Amino acid sequence: MIVYLHGFRSSPASNKAQRLKAHMAVRGLGHLFRCEQLPVSPRAAIALAESAIAAAATPVTVVGSSLGGYYATHLAEKHRLRAVLINPAVVAHLSLAEFVGPQTNLYTGETFDFRPQHIEELRAIEVPRLSRPEDVLLLVEEGDETLDYRQAVAKYAGCRQVVLPGGDHSFTRFADYMDTILDFAGLQR
């Protein structure tokens, strides 16, 4: 099963979530895809993801984009799961500190208040070092304008890494790597 974790100010309606969902459905794997709207609170987002993991009848791979990659790192480490990280936030409590205050979801238009307590919740789930780098696949594009890809390359040293020139924070070549994600998750038929 894939539990997909979207990024900050994003939603299950994101391009990557929808493309992976459709790709899996075409391959008869639609029932093995789950993506929920994550709450603004990192603690609540982790709890929601953990309920999806606990309910899964098959082995779970967490796939996370941006902030979702930060969450996926924590969940993979805590629950001994495989993880695919797409242009992940590496030190989310630092990179998101400037966003404390009112925010708007890019897909739903809903507004929410990102609070200092959320930064502390992010700090509490940081994974300083991976115990099983072989269980992590990192996908980054060097042209990411939001997060410095070099931080991810350094943090996830020892993991399988795909580092592509150009691109941007959306990971423009996502469609080219959907089968790679399914292979890594053991879901190719």
Image (tube, rainbow, N blue to C red):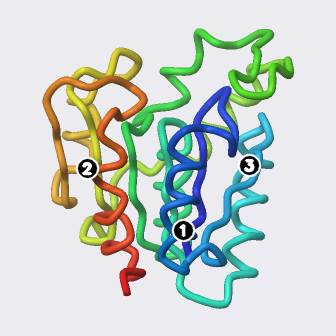
Residue 154 against residue 71 in the figure, above or below: above
> Could you say which is closer to the camera, residue 128 or residue 29?
29
Calculate the distance from the C-alpha at mark 2 to the C-alpha at mark 3.
Answer: 23 Å
Is the residue under label 1 in contact with that under label 3 (CB below 8 Å)?
no
Crowd class of label 3 (few under 14; some 14 to 19; many from 20; radius 10 Å): some
- Picture layout, residue 20 above or below residue 82: above
Q: Identify which residue is drawn at 72% across, 79% down.
A: 54
Decide which of 159, 185 is in the foreground and name it: 185
SS at mark 1 in the image: helix
At 39% across and 50% down in the image, what residue appears? Answer: 85
What amino acid is labelled 1 in the image? Lys
Number of labels in the image equals 3
Which image quarter holds the C terminus? bottom left
Q: Amino acid at mark 3?
A: Ala
Q: Residue 156's x, y, as percent? A: 26, 49
Q: Which residue is mark 2?
A: 156
Mark 3 and mark 1: Cα distance apart in space: 15 Å
Quarter residue 118 falls in: top right
Binning the other alpha carbons within 10 Å of mark 2 as few (below 14), some (14 to 19) or many (20 upward) gives many
Question: Residue 24, which numbered label?
Answer: none
Please name the amino acid that badge 2 sits on.
Answer: Tyr
Q: Quadrant of residue 124?
A: top right
**Does residue 31 appear to the left or right of 94 in the view shown?**
right
Give the quarter of the figure containing the N terminus: bottom right
Q: What mark, if any, has residue 45 been given in the picture? A: 3
Does 152 sit left or right of 72 as displayed? left
Question: Which mark identifies residue 78?
Answer: 1
Q: SS for tag 2?
A: loop
Question: What x and y, as percent, mark residue 14?
Answer: 61, 38
Of the image marks 1 and 2, the number of the one nearer the N terminus: 1
Pinpoint residue 169: horizontal percent, then vertical percent: 39, 26
